[in-house]
Image (tube, rainbow, N blue to C red):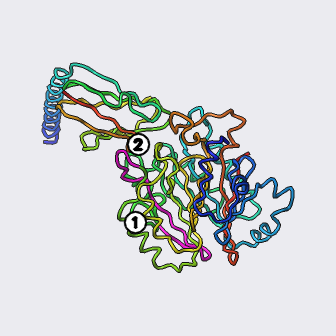
């Protein structure tokens, strides 16, 4: 991990007692796996290897073991991509599925945060569906920009939009946690970033108004809902408006994809997290001429791809986010 | 009677095909006459090169995607719109009227460009 990327991640607007060293550990590249716990607004972080070696996470492991909800986020499968950065995206997606199946506590469902396909081709979606079927789990999808090419997202809606509104946004409850899937890849404007649009914002405001402030909220969308690196389009123009609706909620977790690398930020009551891709890595912000696919030596590829495992434990008001690679 | 109908239908089809060929031929001729040049815009590293292109009226501009990621070429005023272009795919548009034509990639809207037609 580059120094630049660490700097990018060290923004702590909250001054909530997270010490610099602890935060850095949390930001360690997921090659070793990281575990982050948000408890009562305080983020604690541990490297997975350390926790396994020293047993320093006994309390947390015990809590997670009896956790009331566990789910997995996967992202950016880009089925159909066949360029040098990864000529076997089906193989790495299968590796992700094996990783999910090997989790000590089976997840209840999966979230896919978009770019399921590379070119919105029916056979690409078919291939992903076939591979994910092996998990035996329900999958909730939000589209990435690669899933709505040429047809304004009609195919995405036909395949994955059941029970959703508009361009595919939706909310649902699982074990007392309120999940909101947002679509920020439609009707993009020249020179702009991701867009949610007035209709979706209005829906979101109403959706959240009816929830008690103690309800844990998980928002998932493809393009980051925080300004990661606008120069590369890594942000959402009207995210500030959307996030104004979660003010006052005790626990808000925002899960995104799109940037093919793990990043986290805590801002007030909101924890932002981006997942690794299952297909290919992209460069850290500003470290290359463009955000195009990054070619790494073949033996390193699976170290920079991954899945995200999230646990919610009631009573502890804690949401644990664990990234693991595909090695 | 059936045979007569068949012949009649055949004749109609032949006539239709012939008229279509004539119309098509004429339009090809018109385009060829009005196309003094062709220019290529490269799509590379998530940018259009050149970002601003000046051409004379009637020039055919071809965009070629050299990235590993698909892009589109979409006029902000709705004048032209490509399908998604995978690596090495192209899209062409012939500019017949003077003016400034702003466009962008609808997949990566930070990518913008313009064609100035004189």
Horizontally, is A216 left or right of A97 in the view?
Answer: left
Horizontally, is A271 left or right of A205 in the view?
Answer: right
The residue to which callout 1 is attached is: A201
Q: Residue at 29% of width from left, 40% of height from top? A: B75
**Alpha carbon separation for disc pair 1 and 2:** 22 Å
The image position of residue A165, as x and y in percent, is 41, 66
Residue A176 within the magenta-colored segment of the rendering:
yes
Query: Residue A40 lies in what quarter of the image?
Result: bottom right
Q: Which disc is residue B31 wearing? A: none
In this picture, is A150 found above or below B50? Answer: below
- In front of the other: A298 or B32: A298
- Please tell me if label 1 and label 2 are on a single chain: no
- In front of the other: B92 or A261: A261
- Does the image show residue A222? no
The residue to which callout 2 is attached is: B110
**Which secondary structure, mark 2?**
loop
The image position of residue A100, as x and y in percent, is 70, 56
The chain carrying label 2 is B
In this picture, is A120 found above or below A60? Answer: above
Q: Residue at 40% of width from left, 70% of height from top? A: A203
The image position of residue A93, as x and y in percent, is 63, 47
* Residue extent of the magenta highlight: A170-192
**Which secondary structure, mark 1?**
helix
- Does the image show residue B106? yes
The image position of residue B100, as x and y in percent, is 22, 35
Residue A211 within the magenta-colored segment of the rendering:
no
Q: Residue at 47% of width from left, 52% of height from top? A: A235
């Amino acid at each position: 991990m580059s120094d630049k990327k660490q700097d990018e991640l060290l923004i702590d607007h909250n001054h909530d007692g997270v010490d610099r060293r602890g935060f850095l550990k949390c930001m360690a590249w997921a090659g070793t796996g990281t575990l982050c716990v948000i408890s009562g607004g305080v983020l604690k972080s541990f490297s997975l290897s350390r926790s396994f070696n020293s047993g320093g996470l006994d309390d947390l492991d015990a809590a997670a073991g009896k956790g009331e909800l566990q789910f997995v986020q996967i992202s950016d499968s880009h089925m159909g991509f066949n360029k040098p950065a990864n000529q076997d995206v089906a193989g790495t997606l299968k590796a992700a599925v094996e990783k999910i199946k090997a989790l000590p506590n089976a997840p209840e469902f999966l979230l896919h945060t978009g770019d399921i396909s590379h070119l919105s081709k029916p056979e690409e979606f078919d291939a992903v569906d076939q591979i994910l079927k092996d998990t035996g789990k329900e999958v909730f999808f939000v589209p990435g920009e690669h899933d709505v090419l040429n047809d304004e997202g009609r195919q995405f809606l036909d395949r994955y939009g059941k029970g959703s509104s508009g361009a595919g946004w939706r909310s649902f409850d699982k074990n007392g946690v309120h999940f909101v899937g947002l679509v920020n890849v439609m009707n993009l404007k020249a020179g702009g970033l991701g867009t949610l649009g007035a209709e979706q914002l209005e829906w979101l405001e109403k959706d959240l108004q009816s929830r008690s402030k103690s309800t844990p909220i998980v928002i998932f969308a493809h393009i980051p809902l925080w300004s990661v690196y606008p120069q590369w389009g890594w942000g959402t123009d009207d995210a500030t408006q959307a996030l104004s609706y979660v003010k006052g909620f005790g626990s808000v977790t925002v899960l995104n994809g799109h940037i093919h690398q793990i990043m986290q930020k805590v801002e007030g009551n909101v924890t932002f997290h981006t997942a690794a891709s299952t297909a290919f890595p992209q460069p850290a912000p500003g470290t290359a001429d463009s955000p195009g696919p990054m070619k790494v030596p073949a033996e390193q590829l699976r170290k920079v791809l991954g899945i995200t495992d999230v646990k919610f434990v009631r009573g502890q008001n804690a949401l644990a986010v664990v990234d693991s690679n595909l090695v | 009677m059936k045979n007569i109908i068949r012949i009649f239908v055949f004749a109609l089809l032949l006539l239709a095909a012939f008229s279509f060929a004539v119309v098509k031929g004429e339009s090809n001729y018109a385009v060829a006459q009005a196309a003094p040049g062709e220019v290529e815009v490269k799509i590379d590293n998530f940018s259009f090169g050149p970002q601003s292109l000046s051409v004379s009226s009637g020039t055919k501009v071809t965009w070629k995607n050299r990235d590993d990621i698909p892009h589109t070429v979409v006029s902000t005023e709705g004048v032209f719109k490509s399908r998604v272009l995978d690596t090495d795919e192209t899209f062409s548009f012939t500019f017949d009227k003077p003016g400034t034509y702003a466009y962008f990639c609808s997949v990566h809207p930070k990518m913008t460009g313009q064609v100035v037609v004189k």
